[in-house]
Amino acid sequence: MPTPTREIYWNITGHNLVYAAFAVAVIVFAWGFYRRYRLYRLGQPENRFDQIGKRLWSVIKNGVAQISVMKDRFPGSMHVAIYSGMVVLTIGTFLVLLQADFSLKILYGQFYLWYSLILDIFGVLFILGILLALFRRYVIRPDRLNIILDDAVILFVLLIIGITGFLLEGTRIAATNPQWANWSPVGYMIAGWFTESQAITAHRILWWVHMVMSMIGIAYVPYSKLFHVLMSPANMYFKSLKPRGELSTIDIETAETFGVSDISEFTWKQLLDLDACTHCGRCQDQCPAYNSEKPLSPKKLILDLNNHLTIRGNELIKAKKTETEPDPVPIAGTAVAEDEIWACTTCMACQEHCPVDIEHVQKIVDLRRALVLMDSKFPQELNTAFKGLETNANPWNMGAALRAEWMEGLNVPTLADNPEPDYLWFVGCAGAFDDQAKATSEAFAKILNKAGVSYAILGTDEQCCGDPARRSGNEYVFQMLAETNIEAFKSVKFKKLITACPHCFNTIRNEYPQFDGQFEIIHHTELIHELMETGKLKLDKKISETAAYHDSCYLGRYHGIYDEPRHIMKKMTNGNLKELKRNRSSSFCCGGGGARFFMEENIGSRINHLRIQEAADAKINTLGVACPFCLTMLSDAVKEKELDNIRVKDIAQLIAELLDD
């Protein structure tokens, strides 16, 4: 038996023209890439070049291994089939190039046989993935997908490349009849469709069709959605390595502008984000604003910003060349409607489910900052919150002297009673002023006293953590509050901070370090779990009702705290704990984050109604929460929907009910 191999460029005359076509394709590609690169350079500087090892691992895990893509099984599998087929077939073509142009003996013997089989397998996966994509896009037509010409062109070009590749293999086998043809099973089957003379003619024609379509595909990449093939791995590499809950800061004293009004005020990485988008719509599927008929779709936001970047960016480049001053074109009100900007709850569901690490929330907050600090344009309802934060250090605008009123008669120690506590309890504004959240504070105080924990509170010296101010774009007020609290914390000797509010938890843990405020802080569910595990807190009773736990966005997606609250509730219910339809990293927001707690919800349906309906559908009687905003939003939803069979309680409240006095 002769050595298995094949003649490169068999039956082809004038094949050198392919190199000229390839050169043209590369030039067209390079020009398209350069046009986008020029736009990124309009952005502001940002250091995303540190921690190379972590960045490379992100690309390997989610770019090469496609782990994040596979979180959504059906479209993920479809994408992996196309991606893996494209990668393997490209490698196969590169090996042909090495043998043809560098005289390297690669495609010979046993290696060639396995090469032929592997390329057939991945070629089938490639075509199958494209066919599934066509079926899903044009037959199933999920709401999250756009139907645009670009998608049809891309899928058509790729499909023609895949089909002509197999037809080429089949006609070559039909004409040459190699003894090892069965190592190319698809081509071997196709070979039976042709006589030898038909195969020779068809092969010559198909070869040129295949090559021309391949060159078109290469040239088209930077002008189409296919550009994400390059930009998505780049975006994964340059992803933020800061804690998820840490927003960027502004130097209030030196900054000339605040937030982002013009597209050039985003950083270069934020602009790169826009080209990384695959248009998959996973962010839109998970967004509570979109799911409650608000104008915001995270996918549409990114696509609209990308379109605006193309138009406005080229205007800015032209103005720079001609040394003219371009007219201002604010993003808000042109590329993005103000209602979109204010609809976001900052729940982070979009970023959690984005397979290419696009950072939506920071962009939205940057746009809010410009509206608030530069234009004084914000929802009217925020007037009370902003005034209260500035004058009384709380968004309820209650007198600061009333902050400790909730603790009267509860034996809650202040620093005067316990000047060096193990835990300094940051009660938070909701825990001090909101009627429903005050019940959580009372319950948590009972738990701490029952377990003999050494703790104290700041009382009237405590101020709002600043979360509502920062996430509504009022960076100036946030920094004022943060610096005052940091000064207060530094004046006290304690081991750890503790809070029952995930928003306070996130702000102090991730954002106070920006102002030299490094403090160890834990959430009250973490301490309760520890007390129960160590036997310092024992339940005297159990819950007999059907119960479930609602994951707070700022505790779950922001910090990965999913297990401790569940362990607590399992002990309360003897393990009889149900899960809501959307839970853990896919939990549905209550609607109160991003300062939405202090704004009216006048568009579409109410987010908290959608969430509480999931509890009703699951026939839940007790819904445990671990956030004061969730507590109020979901309790209000119970009343408004008249779901009298459901009670919403903070985990601390549930525990306190099971303790003897």
Image (cartoon, helix red, strand yellow):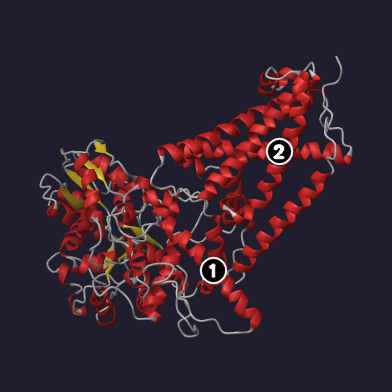
Q: Answer yes or no: is residue 113 visible.
A: no
Judge from the rendering whether residue 449 lies leftward or rightward of residue 524; answer left or right: left
Classify mark 2: helix, strand or loop: helix
Front residue of this view, candidates 335 and 282: 335
What kind of residue is marked 1? Ile
What kind of residue is marked 2? Val
Location of mark 1 (residue): 311
Residue at 53% in and 67% down: 309
CB-based contact (under 8 Å), mark 1 and mark 2: no
Using the image, determine if residue 568 lies above or below residue 180: below
Q: CA distance from mark 1 to mark 2?
A: 35 Å
Image mark for residue 209: 2
x and y percent of residue 91 in the render? 72, 39
Residue at 57% in and 62% down: 272
Image mark for residue 653: none
Using the image, determine if residue 215 lies above or below residue 329: above
x and y percent of residue 625 in the render? 25, 51
Please tell me how many numbered marks the rendered image carries. Answer: 2
Front residue of this view, candidates 416 and 184: 184
Q: Answer yes or no: is residue 64 visible.
A: yes
Counting residues from the start of the chain, the first of labels 1 and 2 encountered is 2
x and y percent of residue 47 in the render? 59, 67
